[in-house]
Amino acid sequence: MEKKKYFLWVGFIVGLITLIILSFIFIKNSLIILISSVLISFIFKPVVDFFEKKKIPRSVSVLIIFFICSLLLFVSLYLLIPQLIVQTNHLLENLTEEKIKLILTSLEESIISKFPFLNKVDLTNQFAKFLSDFFINISNNLSKLVTNLFSFFAVLFIIPFLTFFLLKDSKLIVEEIINLSPSKYSELTKYVVSKTTHQLSRYVRGWILDAFIVGSLIAIGLTILGINNSISIGFIAGLGHLIPYFGPVIGGLPALIISLFQYGDFSMLPALIILFAVVYTFDNGIIQPKIFSKSTDLHPVVIIFLILIGNELLGLLGMLIAIPATTVIKTIIKEVKIGLQLYKTREN
């Protein structure tokens, strides 16, 4: 009998996963908006719960949070956007074809003087083509991301609208999920939903906090080293850190390229390697254990495979949410098993 219950739950989970995959295929854009709203609601739920304990209605609490976030966003944009524009314009000025070829020609002469066998290889044109393709691909991907996934209307209205009701009516939503289950499994469903939402909420907040810390440390380190566009690179490194194992490459490559244009050689390469090594060692050794407490417990090969699947389904956003989604599914299976054991103990 117990095995039958367990297989019923496993069947439910498999069906849920199948439904999610089909949703990715047929209603991808709508699902992306919903997932974004859910992730944002998980970030702010503890704050809403805190205000509620202080006898402030949830709807008022959510509005207070929205106001504070809007104010912080406005101040941040007011302070950072002008600097980002200046740094970006400076970067684009340095990426003109003439300047690129001038720097690469000097670099090629230096390399060939040390490695004469490379004299027959047209390093300048090949590297210039690589850089051109690299930045064109970044530009195209960002344009597609903004155009197809996060339209102006969705960002300004739909996502905040959904997030508001997810925060305001979170308890009601949980109750409705529990009511969908058979009455004799209501306690088990409540236990699984509670544990899963708690686990995901902690993971998402830690995930965002960790990326913010890493991006900030990279930006500070690059500023100390005197690298141009340090804020922009730090922002890119923070976003890249949201994708496991890809962060150092996503943040390190722009830093190396910009330092190359700034100094005309690889003289800053050792300093950049040391900076990224120190930041990521600090992150892996101190920050992540404190924040995540082994919440994923997934093998690196599995993580990379999941990221590739996420990229196939949803592109960049799929890479970002692949691990949180897997964490949820894994938590559900684990908590269902524990819940069934508790259910069996109570019956006996």
Image (cartoon, rainbow, N blue to C red):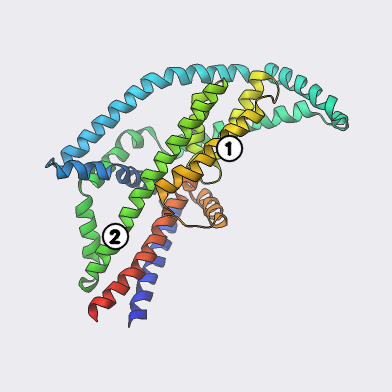
Contact between marks 1 and 2 (CB within 8 A): the answer is: no
Instruction: Please tell me which residue is depicted at 47% across the width and 51% down the height of the picture.
Output: 322
Residue 19 visible to the viewer: no
User: Residue 272: where, in percent of width, then height?
Assistant: 61, 30
Horizontal side of 265 relative to 231 (left or right) equals right
Depth-wise, is mark 1 or mark 2 nearer the camera? 1
User: Residue 81: where, in percent of width, then height?
Assistant: 42, 21
Q: Is residue 11 above or below residue 290?
A: below
Horizontal side of 159 relative to 259 (left or right) equals left
Amino acid carrying label 1: it is Ala
10 Å neighbourhood of mark 1: few (<14), some, or many (≥20)?
few
Horizontal side of 310 relative to 160 (left or right) equals right
Instruction: Please tell me which residue is depicted at 26% across the width and 40% down the height of the picture.
Output: 161
Of 223 and 138, nearer the camera is 223
Of 313 and 295, nearer the camera is 295
Picture quadrant where residue 262 is located: top right
- Read off the residue under disc 1: 277
Locate the C terminus and report the quarter of the image it occupies. Answer: bottom left
User: Residue 224: where, in percent of width, then height?
Assistant: 53, 22
The mark nearer the N terminus, 1 or 2, is: 2
Horizontal side of 287 relative to 120 (left or right) equals left
Distance from disc 1 to disc 2, alpha carbons, whole Å, reads 39 Å
Residue 184 visible to the viewer: yes
Amino acid carrying label 2: it is Val
Q: Which mark is residue 263?
A: none
Q: How many marks?
A: 2
SS for tag 2?
Answer: helix
- Read off the residue under disc 2: 193
User: Residue 307: where, in percent of width, then height?
Assistant: 52, 50
